[in-house]
């Protein structure tokens, strides 16, 4: 009997942002195939005796190839085991979940998708930055910091009211420069949110002209948020603590 594969979003990092459905599936599954951006505490939610398979990726370093991940998912399911493919954030937001879904469909493996809280919204929120705000920005654009020829339409991204750029850690300086070259002012507010919602979360604010110097040695994962909404952090940042928001007495 063929097993089932669940493509599950783990959220941005904080284990308490995992959905109830994801937690239930983890507690019942036979195999967990997980990314490096999955918080270690989430793996403790897996059924006792479940097989844990690391399938992490990191730019510029050795990683498990996407085709190999497809092979693992298909092989485990064909062996009759239920599999949770646990991915940081949301499977369908720069998580290559669509590719995995297509591979499973082609192989005749039953699967479903459990959405997760995307870091594109959650990480800025943890930093006190709403990606939309009445009178400031009515839309948000998500993109990745790919810099290959023809891969990124920087002029289109520069026109966004709010831009959230994923995977910008090692490409921060080049991304900021590309946006200025595409028409944005060097004084445009922006922020880098590194490891959003994790215990090691780090937030650096500045402008497109200063952010690379201010956020030197940016680690991974990191997002670049660009737009006037970043200025709201001055009012909201002190009231939004992470991972725990202190309770304040009224009056």
Image (spheres, grey):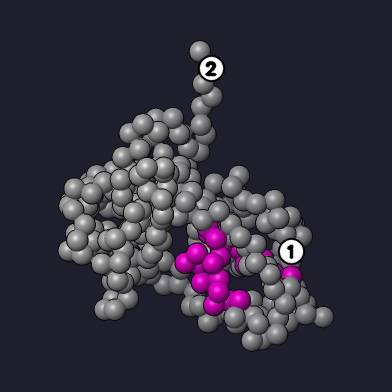
Residue 209 at x, y percent in the picture: 17, 51
Give yes or no for residue 85 being in the magenta stretch. Answer: yes
The quadrant in which the N terminus is found is: bottom right
At 72% from the left edge and 77% from the top edge, which residue is drawn? Answer: 110
Kindly identify which residue carries mark 1.
Answer: 29
Give yes or no for residue 132 being in the magenta stretch. Answer: no
SS for tag 1? Answer: loop
Mark 2 residue crowding within 10 angstroms, few (<14) / some (14–19) / many (20+): few
At 33% from the left edge and 58% from the top edge, which residue is drawn? Answer: 160
Residue situated in front as seen by the camera: 227 or 117: 227
Question: Which residue is at the far right?
Answer: 1
Residue situated in front as seen by the camera: 50 or 190: 190
Span highlighted in magenta in the image: 82-101
Kindly identify which residue carries mark 2.
Answer: 249
Rendered view: 177 above or below 250: below
Confirm whether residue 183 shows in the render. yes
How many marks are shown on the rendered structure? 2
Give the left or right position of residue 236, taking residue 2 as reference.
Answer: left
């Amino acid at each position: 009997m063929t097993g089932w594969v669940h493509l599950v979003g783990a959220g941005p990092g904080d284990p308490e942002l995992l959905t109830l459905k994801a937690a239930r599936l983890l507690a019942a599954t036979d195999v967990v195939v997980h990314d490096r951006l999955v918080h270690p505490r989430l793996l403790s939610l897996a059924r006792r005796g479940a097989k844990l398979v690391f399938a992490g990726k990191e730019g510029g370093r050795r990683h498990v190839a996407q085709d190999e991940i497809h092979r693992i998912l298909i092989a485990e399911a064909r062996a009759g085991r239920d599999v949770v493919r646990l991915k940081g954030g949301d499977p369908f937001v720069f998580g290559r979940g669509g590719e995995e879904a297509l591979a499973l469909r082609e192989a005749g493996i039953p699967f479903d998708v459990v959405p997760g809280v995307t870091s594109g919204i959650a990480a800025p929120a943890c930093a006190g930055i709403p990606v939309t705000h009445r009178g400031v920005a009515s839309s948000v654009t998500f993109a990745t910091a790919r810099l290959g020829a023809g891969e990124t339409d920087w002029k289109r991204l520069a026109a966004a009211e709010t831009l959230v750029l994923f995977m910008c850690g090692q490409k921060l300086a080049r991304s900021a420069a590309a946006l200025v070259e595409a028409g944005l002012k060097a004084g445009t507010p922006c922020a880098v949110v590194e490891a959003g919602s994790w215990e090691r979360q780090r937030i650096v604010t500045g402008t497109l002209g200063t952010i690379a110097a201010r956020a030197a040695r940016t680690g991974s994962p990191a997002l670049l948020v660009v737009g006037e909404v970043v200025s709201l952090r001055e009012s909201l940042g002190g009231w939004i603590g992470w991972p725990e928001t202190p309770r304040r007495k009224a009056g």
